[in-house]
Image (cartoon, rainbow, N blue to C red):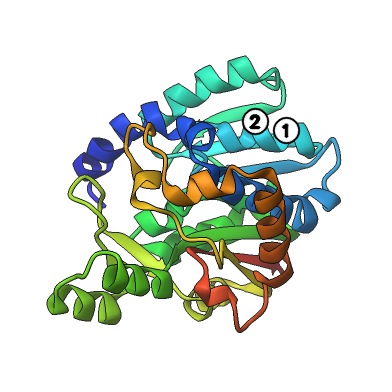
Amino acid sequence: MDQKTFDDFFQPYAQNVDKADNVSAFWRLSDVLIMEIIKESVGKQCTEQTVVCDAGGGTGRWAAKMSKEIPGNFMVYDRSVDMLAKAKENIEKSGFSDRITLVQGDLTDMKNVGSESIDHIVSIYSPISFIYEDGKAVSEMHRVLKTGGKILLMGHSYYNALASKVNNYRAESEEIARLSKEYRVKWAPHVPELVTFSKESMESLLETAGFQIEKTYGVPVFVQPGPEDFDPENEKVSAVSMYLGNPDVFKEIFDLEMEHNCKGTVANRGMNIFTLATKI
């Protein structure tokens, strides 16, 4: 992705993305599911000396959230200067600034991070989908990760994109055919074209770089967002978010998601594909 396209999207995005879970119960549920997966698969192995890299960590929101739940130190690694500027503000407010560092750089060339210097990597809400040379990025993450370290890598779901373009967008046949063949999706004029992944293609990407696959999750697999959940200003509320505003419904669906989201026959239903692997 060229720098202008990248900056044109992330400059305004940096100012509004952190508001989403305060307005949308859909995104709040998604966040809770992701945190549960991180705690179970990576967090249990962390100590005060552990270094976790949030690859494409943007505004630092997830580094701050993880610092509350998981011991260790966190590196927010991101290409966007605008996102990191927002991250600096967020980290200073979080009370965890002594445990979080910010590093600017491209995931396809992590030359400012030493080989085998990171204990674990998480990459949340699909930075890999913005990278057209995804193989180079995953190879770099493999290089900087210590042997035995875990990676949790999230990308936009291919099958969810196809279903959404058919059912929600009523896309033209040419657009459906291109997505089907090229695994790339264009959601809106202001959003860059994104790479999508199936469970199988994400696992293949990681295996090619030298990782051993542990498990793949769909996040979420049953709940689908409404169009208002993608409001760039994060002010509108969807019908599904109003539904999830009921605490009993929220808990029941959370439990249902966690029971089924890593089953091989279910993960490809996910809005996002979230794969856990180990460097061997």
Residue 258 seen: yes
- Residue 187 vs residue 87, the one in the foreground: 187
Secondary structure type for disc 1: helix
Q: Is residue 33 above or below residue 95?
A: below
* Amino acid type, residue under disc 2 in the picture: Ala
Q: Position of residue 152 (x, y in %)?
A: 63, 58
Q: Is residue 79 above or below residue 199?
A: above
Residue 116 seen: no
- Residue at x-position 66% and y-position 64%: 257
Q: Position of residue 55 (x, y in %)?
A: 54, 47
Q: Badges 1 and 2: C-beta atoms under 8 Å apart? A: yes
Where on the picture, by quarter, is residue 163? bottom left
Q: Is residue 108 above or below residue 265?
A: above
Q: Position of residue 8 (x, y in %)?
A: 22, 37
Q: Quadrant of the C terminus?
A: bottom right
Q: CA distance from mark 1 to mark 2?
A: 5 Å
Q: Which mark is residue 121?
A: none
Q: Which mark is residue 64?
A: 2
The residue beneath circle 1 is 67
